[in-house]
Every structure is written in structure tokens, then in C-alpha cells.
Amino acid sequence: MFRKTSAMVEAGILAAIAIVMALISMYVPVAGVFVNFVWPLPIIICGMRHGLKWSLMSLTVAGIIVAVIISPLQAFFLVAIFGLMGIVLGECMRRRMPPMRLMFFGSIGAVVALILNVVLSFAVLGINPIEMMFTSFNQSLTELATYYREQGMSEADIKTAIQGYADLLSMMRIIMPGAFLVSAPALAFVNYWAAKKILVKLGESFEPFPPFSQLQIPGWILWPYGASLFAVTYFYLNDKNSWMYDLSVNVQTVTSFALVLQGICLIYWFVEHKKKPAWWAHTATTLMFFIPLFSQMIVYVGAFDIIFDYRKIRSKRLR
């Protein structure tokens, strides 16, 4: 009886925290963006400590109150995307799954939640959130052109600049599915890491992640990466508007991300193994975000490590 009462009280407190976080995400411009990404935290903690039933109850209460005090649309967004991921991660942590397996299920939960949000938004509310986002971007281009004219830019320069931004938006629209798949593990990891930090302070213990420098991407990733390179080139030259081109670009986006991760692991391993300053690896990782050519080089570094097993990880596993 006492345990049930304790679980009820803690679930209520965590639901209240989720509501406060929803208010911050809605009304505090800068902090709200970051709070949105860790909104599943109270649900994860509740699920880990008291099980699936209480995490569902906490999520339901938070969703209803957010719908009343903010808006049903905001509640729908939080529950459909972040709530589902919180439920999945909390249950996986309660079952003490190994970290990599937990990340796998957490990533699947995040992907399913993102897809559900788009589908349900269209089916229930009659809106397409992706189209709304790109409509807003296109309106921004019109405003940007007006601003350039006010600054005295020539029409030719304005046309060139706006066309460049339009091409970028067109590519963003194409790679949106791949971006969902790439962002899912990152979203799951951030929430798992934060929940683990809090739960460890509450007396829980978890199996640690393997060292980052020892992570290994499956070798089969090279096959879809190589196929996507040829497919993107072929369809770009022959049928750029086909769905096969879009599919090839998304496959290349996802597999390139995996190879970049492999390449970064190799860089950190090299720095550790050769006892070089840690800022070497930090600098290389930072440059990747600002220099496209450098990020492509890291893709090839990752492919090199998979093919030649430079860190001898596969060799050690076979012994």
C-alpha cells in the first residue's frame, strides 16, 4: 500500500514537472527549444522507477493538463512525439537492457513517434506539419528578398542569392525522411544520458556504454552507401524528379551519417592510442560542421576503418 502511494505521489510530481517544462517550451523562446528535446525526462524516470502503468498515467495527466492550460495541439505534439519515446526509454531502462540495445529500441521509438506525428496531424487535424514548415521557409525567402532590395542589392544578386536558398530548401525537403532517421538516435541518446545522470544520483545503477573510441558500425553499411553513390549520380543525370532519386539521396544521408560516426570514433581512438592532445580530436569534430569537404573526408576515414579494421576491433572479437 505504501509503495503504491509512493509511486502515485512520485508520478504526480513528475507529471507536474512535465507540465512546467511544457510551459517553458511554449513561453520561454531560447530555453524552450532545448527543453522541448528533454521533455521525455520525467516520463522516462517515472517508467524506470515505477513501471509502464505509472509512466502512462503520468503522461496522460500531463497531456490533459497541457491541453487545458496551453492548447490541445501542443499537448498532441508533446505526447505523440516525446511521450512515446519517454515510455519506450523508461521501459527499456527498467528492464536493464544493454546500452546499445536500449539505444536501438529508443531510436525506433523516436522514429515511430515522428512518423505518427506527421500522419496523425494530417488525419486528425487536417494539417501537414512538414508542408507548414516549408511554407514558412518560402515566405521567409520573400521577406529576405525585400530586405536585400532595401539594402541596395542589385536584382541579379538578389535573384542569385534567393535561388541558392531555394535550392537548399528543395534539398532539405528531399532529405527530410533521412533527417528523421539520423536525428532519432541523437534524440534518444540525449534523453537516455540525462535520465541516467539523474537516476544514478537517486541510487540506480546501469551498465556503462562501451568507450566511444571502441564503437564499431556494422560493415554491411558500406553496401547501401556504395549503391546510393551510384544511384544518386545516375538519377541526378537522368531522372532527378523521380522517387528513386529521393530514395537514393536519403539512403546516402543515413549511411554517410553512420560512416561519419565511425570516422570520428577512429579519430578519437588515434588521439588516445598515440597519446596526442584531446583538442586534436575536438577540433577535427568541430571542423566537420563548418567545412563540407572535411566532413566528406571523415566519411572516407570511417569507410577506411571498416574495410581495413585499422583499430583491430574485429580481430580482437574473433580471438
Image (cartoon, grey):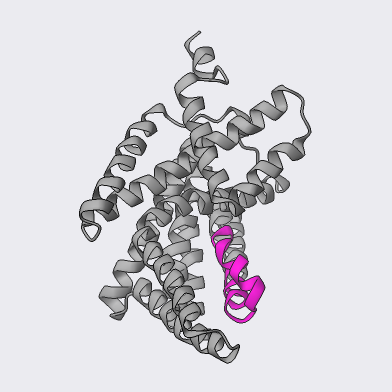
Residue 63: x, y in percent? 47, 73
- The residue located at (44%, 48%) in the rendering is 107
The quadrant of the picture occupied by the N terminus is bottom right
Percent across and percent down for residue 242 are 21, 58
Q: Tell me, yes or no, if residue 95 can be seen here.
A: no
Main structural element of the magenta stretch: helix, strand or loop? helix
What residue is rendered at 77% in x and 29% in y? 276
Task: Depth check: give the residue in front, 190 or 130.
Answer: 130
Whether residue 100 is in magenta: the answer is: no
Query: Residue visible at 60% across and 64% down?
Result: 14
On the rendered structure, is 245 left or right of 305? left
Q: Is residue 44 above or below residue 280?
A: below
Left or right: 125 with respect to 269?
Answer: left
**Highlighted range, magenta:** 18-41
Residue at the top extreme, as displayed: 319
* Residue 269 visible in the displayed image: yes
Q: What residue is drawn where x is 56% and y is 67%?
A: 36
